[in-house]
Amino acid sequence: MSVADRRRVLEVVDRLCEDLARPLPAAERAPFEAVRETLHAPLRVAVVGRVKAGKSTLVNALVGRRVAPTAAGECTQVVTWYTYGSPDRAEVHLRDGSTRPLFLENGAVPAGLDVPVAEVRRIVVHLQAGALRDLTLIDTPGLATLTSENEDATRRALLGDGSSTAAAGDADALLFAIREAERQDDFEFLRDFHRASGSLAATAVNALCVLTQADLFGSGDLSGGDPFAIAAEVAQRIAVEHPTDFSAVVPVSGLMAQTARTGLVSESLTRSLRQLAEADPVLLQLWRQVGPPEGVSEAEMTTLWEAVGPYGVVAGREHAGSGAAALRTWLGERSGVDAVDDAVRRQLLPRAHLIKAIRALSVLSTLASRLPDPDDARSRLEAAQLDPDLHPLAELRALRLLSAHAPTSPLLRRLETVVDDPARVSEEAGRGDRGDAATALRRASAYAVGEASRTVVPAEIEAARVLARSYQLLARRVAGSRV
Ligand SMILES: Nc1nc2c(ncn2[C@@H]2O[C@H](COP(=O)(O)OP(=O)(O)OP(=O)(O)O)[C@@H](O)[C@H]2O)c(=O)[nH]1
Ligand SMILES: [Mg+2]
């Protein structure tokens, strides 16, 4: 999809926001203005999951800096946004609407705050980090805690607290962190989020699952088994069992990635690891009970353990022999974090405008009831859904339904191409015998209508109908651009 197409989607929704808010006095337009603001902001991706799932460690790895606190402390109980900005700085946004600066200690969010956590809406950290150019990462307090306060904070931030400005929360998309195995209440939260995401509800378009602490899988096995292979199997199973919840399930060791990407692989760390080359792996795993191997102090062992974890120590020794750079490369590659980046860059970012537009429409339909003429507002919202410029939203919805419910359908590839590269569809149509792209596209549309009647699978019927309209609209555009 071209930049111009993306811009058009956002403009249509933006204009709708403006039109709907017009009858309101200026003082009551804030929720609509908030929707407009989020439309044009970078995609907001929240990392969500149970307590100690490894969310903040993963955030550090993705940002490329050790900025999110990972020890216990007040700041792990506050929703924190990491967003692009210069100079590096942070501020605390309080629930009363005021803001105060927060001092970053050695470039990191401090563990403690000088205001009660309950008064804090969020911390916002501005960083000049390349990874944040296209997206804002939101670190959240763990779910399902003994004290339900953290959970409330996360729920409020993501699902909205019923107040006008936060009608459907702040996040556009989720990285859902699962450690070891999924649990029923993980999915309850996820479904609430999907519901708050409006018509994305039945789809996984805005949620990726990260199976965290992959280096610890199968930890009972001291025989040198590969934890990542076990994690990959679990990830595969979750993907198969929950196709409607996530668009991908990616195993990752946030710890190994954090160490690789934040400059923690020093020469001295590498040297300590090299010292362990000959040590028995079983005794290494048990070093706290039996003491550190010869030549390495307890302090060095602790540093190593905290930096790369037990698997990183045992399997990393071989790579430490080739120096710090080789060790860093191995840790990064083995951690699996590139696959997380990849999933974000391939599945979330190219569709950011659609995800944002769908969410905005959903918030607007909630806000419609507060307008002087709610029926008129609703009919305008319905009319907007038929706007050709917003047809990509229907395509995306159909695509997710199809990949969840009929993943082997021959329509899947076609719909994917239409969603991600409509220019190619027109170009290929133009390469037919008669070279008339518009005619070929109209024929494809008629054929898709036929396909809708040939299948009984609801997701396929929907996909065929949507495709028929996609080809029609492309034909119209091709014909228009020729004159
Ligand atoms: N071995 C290993 N340990 C990890 C990994 N990720 C996190 N940890 C450790 O697990 C503990 C919790 O990590 P955090 O990143 O703070 O987890 P969190 O989900 O942000 O925790 P809360 O914010 O308190 O819910 C820390 O001691 C981390 O060092 C990992 O991939 N592998
Ligand atoms: Mg945390």
Image (cartoon, grey):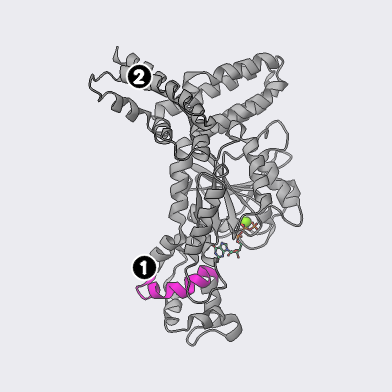
Could you give the CA–CA distance between mark 1 and mark 2, rounded to whole angstroms?
56 Å
Q: What's the mark number on residue 326?
A: 1
Position of 315 relative to 457 (above/below)? below
Q: Quadrant of ligand 1?
A: bottom right
Please report the residue visible at 23 percent of the width from the left and 19 percent of the height from the top. Answer: 434
Magenta span: predominant SS is helix
In reply to whether residue 312 is colored magenta, the answer given is: yes
- The mark that comes first in sequence, 1 or 2, is 1
Name the quadrant of the C terminus.
Answer: top left
Q: What's the mark number on residue 455?
A: none
Is the residue marked by circle 2 packed among few (<14), some (14-19), or many (20+) residues within 10 Å?
Answer: some
Left or right: 232 as drawn, with respect to 100: left
Residue 92, visible in the rendered structure? no
Could you tell me which secondary element the residue under label 1 belongs to?
Answer: helix
Q: Amino acid at mark 2?
A: Arg
Q: Amino acid at mark 1?
A: Ala
Q: Would the CB of label 1 be found within 8 Å of ligand 1?
A: no
Residue 28's spot in the image, x, y percent? 70, 23
Which residue carries the number 2 mark?
443
In reply to whether residue 292 is colored magenta, the answer given is: no
User: Which is in the foreground here, disc 1 or disc 2?
Assistant: 2
Residue 318's spot in the image, x, y percent? 39, 75
Image: magenta residue range: 306-325
Could you tell me which secondary element the residue under label 2 belongs to?
Answer: helix
Name the quadrant of the N terminus.
Answer: top left
Please report the residue visible at 57 percent of the width from the left and 38 percent of the height from the top. Answer: 172
For the residue pair 82 and 108, the one nearer the viewer reads as 82
